[in-house]
């Protein structure tokens, strides 16, 4: 299980390793066991955080986290945040991520496939996360899941004032 103050990057690197691709031919929701497993993993992480929320799995396999307001913020407008837990069905959703220091040169991903240097120039000196080319990184929303879980971790560990909000981790967006 993760540490309480795990970084967004650490969470992201852990989550992208999970097989969560959807299956457009499946009538079930969620369409794959991997999505259900990921939702259960998130639910277990949230239980360990012991924050001011109610967490429930929904019939479609998604997870709804309802966070009560901190004292003095009960009259705040309720916000809702969403992130999907599935990845595109056409490739493996279990990535082998690499954190690369960008030096402005092309970054090879797989034989014959690379990120061109022209796209990387604004990121020189920064660390970026890429796949090894054998799968999708799933960054389009596993980064969102990692970010939202980190927000929840900070709320559980601090006196950060906040109004009421929900986080909905959805299935089968792809």
Image (cartoon, grey):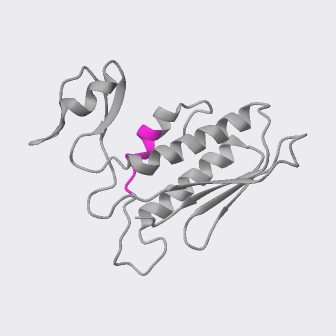
- Estimate the x, y position of residue 3 in percent, counting from the top left: 58, 33
Residue placed farthest to the left in the image?
112
Instruction: Tell me the residue at 54%/58% (across/down).
Output: 39
The residue most toward the right is: 72
User: In the picture, which quadrant includes the C terminus?
Assistant: bottom left
Image spot of residue 67 (x, y percent): 75, 50
Spot occupied by residue 33 in the image (x, y as percentages of width and height): 43, 66
Residue closest to the far bottom: 27
Number of on-image labels: 0
Q: Residue 97 appears at what percent x and percent y?
A: 32, 38
Let me know if residue 101 appears in the view: no
1 or 138: nearer the viewer: 138
Residue 7 or residue 120, whichever sits in front: 120
| Front in this rendered view, residue 42 or 117 | 117
Residue at screen point 42% across, 61% down? 34
Q: Is residue 155 above or below residue 76?
A: above
Identity of the residue drawn at 21% across and 31% down: 118
Q: Is residue 3 magenta?
A: no
Magenta-drawn stretch contains 14: yes
Q: Does residue 122 show up?
A: yes
123 left or right of 134 in image: right
Quarter of image, res 121: top left
State left or right for residue 75 relative to residue 148. right
Relative placement, left or right, of 145 versus 33 is right
Q: Residue at x 76, y 53 (%)?
A: 78
Image quarter in which the N terminus is found: top right
The magenta stretch spans which residues?
12-19
């Amino acid at each position: 299980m993760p540490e309480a103050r795990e970084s967004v990057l650490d969470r992201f690197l852990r989550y992208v390793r999970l097989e969560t691709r959807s299956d457009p031919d499946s009538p079930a929701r969620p369409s794959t066991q991997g999505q259900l497993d990921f939702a259960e993993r998130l639910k277990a992480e949230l239980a360990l955080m012991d924050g001011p929320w109610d967490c429930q799995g929904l019939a479609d396999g998604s997870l709804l986290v309802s966070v009560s307001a901190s004292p003095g913020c009960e009259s705040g407008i309720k916000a809702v945040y969403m992130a999907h837990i599935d990845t595109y069905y056409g490739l493996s959703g279990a990535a082998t991520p690499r954190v690369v220091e960008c030096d402005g040169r092309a970054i090879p991903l797989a034989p014959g496939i690379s990120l061109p240097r022209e796209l990387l120039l604004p990121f020189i000196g920064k660390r970026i996360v890429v796949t090894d080319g054998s799968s999708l990184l799933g960054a389009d929303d596993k980064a969102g899941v990692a970010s939202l879980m980190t927000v929840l971790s900070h709320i559980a560990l601090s006196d950060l004032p906040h109004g009421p909000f929900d986080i909905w981790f959805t299935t089968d967006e792809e």
